[in-house]
């Protein structure tokens, strides 16, 4: 079994392909083993050549479960799951694709590496000002943490900064390949616990990545079990973001430490913690295989609540019928639809982004096709620098068309529950493309947000009162 992959710039740094201790039935392929994927023989050689070039820039990893069970190889590049895991040449601008081809053919690894880095850094690897989310405790940044909204902290365990397969659209792509941006990762949980100990206003810890479910149960236990101590009673909700349910359902069913994992979840739930498995599901096809049903049932039996989220993605799920079917299937399986996000302004945004107007119409049409208990997903939502901005709808007023927007989460609590308007646009792709309605040259929060970013502060993240300082 292959357990090591190398990043896209040659054999520079080994990265773990998985750490969950599975029983060895799954094979992994990453950038340097792309040509070993047996099914690629079924594709047009010109497309495979384009995939090779795109995989120089974007992270690529896929496992044999996804290859054999989820992808419809008869549909080839039209298959949404194929697009979900194989970098496509159209994810690169034509001029970048041409220069990669020229430099690779010239055989100069130094120039090729420099060009790969230039292209990656041109793709906004630190979207939404994430660096400003790193909390400060005792005068120092807390490694591997983000704290943007007062009640919720994110934790990036170093051992969880990979995934069972990579998604081509992932906004966390700089976690997996070298860019000019820093990575978020913590070697151990000690500083995270120190920080949480002094933050009684934090109720939620989100274990994120990568995918925390690539870690062994022993490691996950080391991170999570301390939260059962009375001093962490204020951490009421433990969220685990994962795509393992559909990329590697064996993690919860047949892996050699699957039972221990379920027992850990049961211990947390029995102790009164709300254990929320935040499942990434991008298409209903991922939910069809029987092992997925077994994984969902096992997690629910252990006491976890499963909530689902995905961006709306061109080439993958930009169709209302895909979303309505996905929400119906999720509810039937006992999952709670939670978010329809907008694709973030990073990576191959030009390739996956649908635009605000189209995402809104997909959400509205999908929502109209399902019953009330399937309408729990909020969307479309932009996880932008100032906060999570919900596109509530479209309004005709004063002879003009507008988007109605509102914060679901915000860096400053006063920004919440204040609906605001932007001029309707068929072409706007992100918050930065929207124009405030009524002739204003800024939204009500713009000036304050710019001041926060200039100061490098996290609003509503008063680390100072916890013994730390944001200075
Ligand atoms: S599984 Fe999640 S973190 Fe990993 S590549 Fe996919 S979207 Fe990104």
Image (spheres, grey):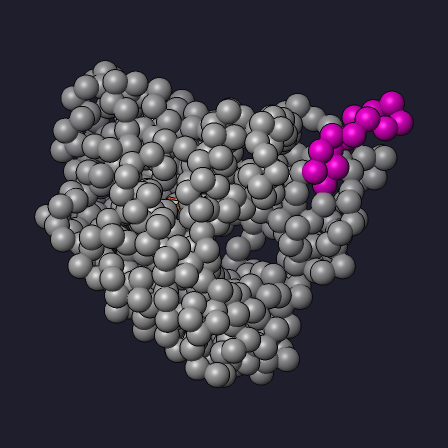
Compared with 57, 95 (above or below) is above
Residue that extends furthest to the right in the rendered view of this protein: 398
Of residues 421 and 216, the one drawn nearer to the viewer in this rendering: 216
Pick whichever, 215 or 249, lies toward us. Answer: 249
Quarter holding the C terminus is bottom right
Task: Please say whether residue 355 is visible from this viewpoint.
Answer: no
Q: Is residue 404 visible?
A: yes
Q: Residue at x 66, y 50 (%)?
A: 408
Q: Position of residue 68 (x, y in %)?
A: 21, 32
Q: How many marks?
A: 0
- Residue 48 image offset from top left, x and y in percent: 24, 23
Which residue is rendered at x = 85% and y = 35% of the image?
438
Q: Is residue 134 magenta?
A: no
Q: Is residue 427 left or right of residue 233?
A: right
Question: Is 402 part of what is drawn in magenta?
Answer: yes
Q: Is residue 398 left or right of residue 373?
A: right
What residue sits 44% from the left and 74% below the top? 271
Q: What's the residue at 29%, 63% (across, down)?
A: 261
Image coordinates of residue 12 in percent, x first then y, are 21, 51
Q: Is residue 187 above or below residue 329?
A: below
Picture coordinates of residue 365, whole percent (x, y): 61, 26
Nearer the observer, 190 or 184: 190
Q: Which residues are magenta?
A: 392-405
């Amino acid at each position: 079994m292959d357990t090591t992959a190398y990043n896209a710039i040659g054999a520079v740094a080994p990265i773990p392909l998985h750490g969950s201790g599975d029983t060895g039935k799954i094979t992994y392929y990453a950038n340097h083993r792309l040509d070993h994927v047996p099914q690629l023989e079924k594709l047009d050689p010109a497309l495979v050549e384009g995939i090779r070039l795109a995989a120089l820039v974007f992270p690529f990893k896929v496992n044999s479960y996804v290859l054999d069970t989820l992808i419809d190889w008869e549909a080839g590049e039209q298959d949404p799951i194929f697009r979900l895991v194989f970098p496509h040449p159209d994810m690169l601008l034509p001029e970048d694709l041409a220069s990669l081809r020229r430099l690779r053919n010239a055989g100069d690894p130094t120039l090729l590496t420099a060009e790969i880095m230039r292209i990656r850094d041109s793709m906004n690897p630190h979207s939404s000002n994430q660096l400003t989310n790193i909390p400060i405790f005792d005068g120092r940044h807390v490694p591997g943490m983000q704290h943007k909204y007062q009640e919720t902290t994110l934790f990036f365990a170093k051992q969880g900064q990979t995934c069972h397969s990579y998604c081509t659209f992932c906004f966390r792509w700089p976690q997996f390949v070298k860019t000019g941006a820093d990575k978020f990762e913590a070697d151990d949980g000690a500083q995270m616990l120190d920080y949480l100990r002094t933050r009684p206003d934090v109720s939620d810890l989100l274990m994120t990545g990568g995918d925390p479910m690539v870690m062994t149960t022993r490691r996950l236990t080391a991170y999570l079990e301390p939260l059962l101590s009375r001093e962490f009673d204020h951490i009421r909700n433990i969220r685990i973001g994962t795509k393992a349910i559909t990329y590697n359902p064996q993690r919860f069913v047949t892996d050699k430490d699957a039972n221990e994992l379920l027992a850990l979840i049961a211990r947390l739930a029995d102790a009164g913690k709300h254990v929320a498995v935040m499942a990434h599901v991008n298409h209903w096809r991922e939910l069809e295989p029987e092992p997925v049903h077994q994984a969902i049932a096992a997690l629910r039996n252990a006491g976890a609540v499963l909530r689902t989220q995905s961006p709306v993605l061109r080439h993958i799920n930009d169709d209302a019928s895909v979303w309505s079917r996905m929400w119906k299937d999720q509810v039937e399986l006992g999952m709670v639809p939670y978010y329809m996000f907008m694709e973030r302004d990073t990576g191959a945004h030009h390739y996956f982004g649908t635009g605000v107007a189209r995402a809104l119409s997909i959400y509205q049409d999908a929502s109209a096709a399902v019953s009330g208990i399937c309408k729990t997903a909020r969307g479309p939502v932009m996880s932008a620098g100032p906060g999570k901005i919900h596109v509530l709808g479209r309004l005709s007023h004063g002879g003009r068309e507008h988007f109605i927007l509102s914060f679901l989460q915000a860096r400053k609590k006063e920004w919440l529950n204040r609906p605001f308007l932007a001029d309707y646009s068929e072409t706007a792709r992100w918050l930065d493309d929207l124009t405030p309605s009524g002739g204003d040259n800024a939204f009500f929060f713009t000036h304050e947000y710019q001041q926060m970013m200039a100061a490098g502060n996290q609003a509503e993240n008063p680390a100072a009162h916890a013994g730390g300082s944001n200075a």
